[in-house]
Amino acid sequence: MKLVGWIVITELTVACGAGWHQKVPAPSGALSSRQQVQVWQGGSALRWHAVRISADSVSGVPFLRPVSCDSCRTGLPRSSVDSIRLGSPVAGFWKTVGLVVGTFVLAGFIYCSQGCSPD
């Protein structure tokens, strides 16, 4: 029975993601400059911020560059973009940490409510 509990805990933690949410169709205009965006094209993702979306193109600054770096801005034709995902990986990380810690606290509470014996 304990093995089943550990399998369930493992599956719950693996199911957590980085907080990305797919947006279809993509919004038009400029997004918040600090909004992280994954632009998917041909099976690979580009991670940008300071994203601008127009009727015919999507452009942004690579995530590891400063938002103010206009010379770093790259763009793609909108027709070549498969999908766009908005998200906050930092928020997703903390939600995952909360789920993992909460799961172990709950497991400990259930275990100790039965007497905390090692058997």
Image (tube, helix red, strand yellow):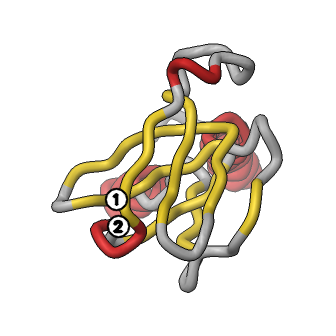
Identify the element where label 1 is drawn: strand
The answer to whether one can see residue 111 in this image is no
Please tell me in which quadrant of the rendered image residue 27 appears.
bottom right
The picture places residue 39, in percent across and down from the top left corner, at: 43, 55
Quadrant of the frame with the C terminus: top left
Identify whether 56 is placed above or below 93: below
Cβ atoms under marks 1 and 2 closer than 8 Å = yes
Of labels 1 and 2, earlier in sequence is 1
Identify whether 64 is placed above or below 13: above
The answer to whether one can see residue 45 in this image is yes
The residue at the far left in this view is: 42
The picture places residue 79, in percent across and down from the top left corner, at: 33, 75
From the viewer's perspective, is 58 left or right of 21? Answer: left
Label 2, residues with CA under 10 Å away: few <14, some 14-19, many ≥20:
some
Q: Residue at x 42, y 63 (%)?
A: 8
The picture places residue 56, in percent across and down from the top left corner, at: 48, 71
Q: Residue at x 63, y 23 (%)?
A: 70
Numbered label attached to residue 92: none
Measure how far apart labels 1 and 2 are at the Cα level: 6 Å
- What number of labels is visible? 2
The residue at the far bottom in this view is: 25
Q: Residue at x 76, y 55 (%)?
A: 30
Identify the element where label 2 is drawn: loop
Label 1, residues with CA under 10 Å away: few <14, some 14-19, many ≥20:
some
Discs 1/2, front = 2
**Residue placed under numbered mark 2 in the picture:** 81
Q: Residue at x 44, y 61 (%)?
A: 15
The picture places residue 93, in percent across and down from the top left corner, at: 63, 37
Please tell me in which quadrant of the rendered image residue 61 appears.
top right
Amino acid type indicated by mark 2: Val
**Residue placed under numbered mark 1 in the picture:** 40
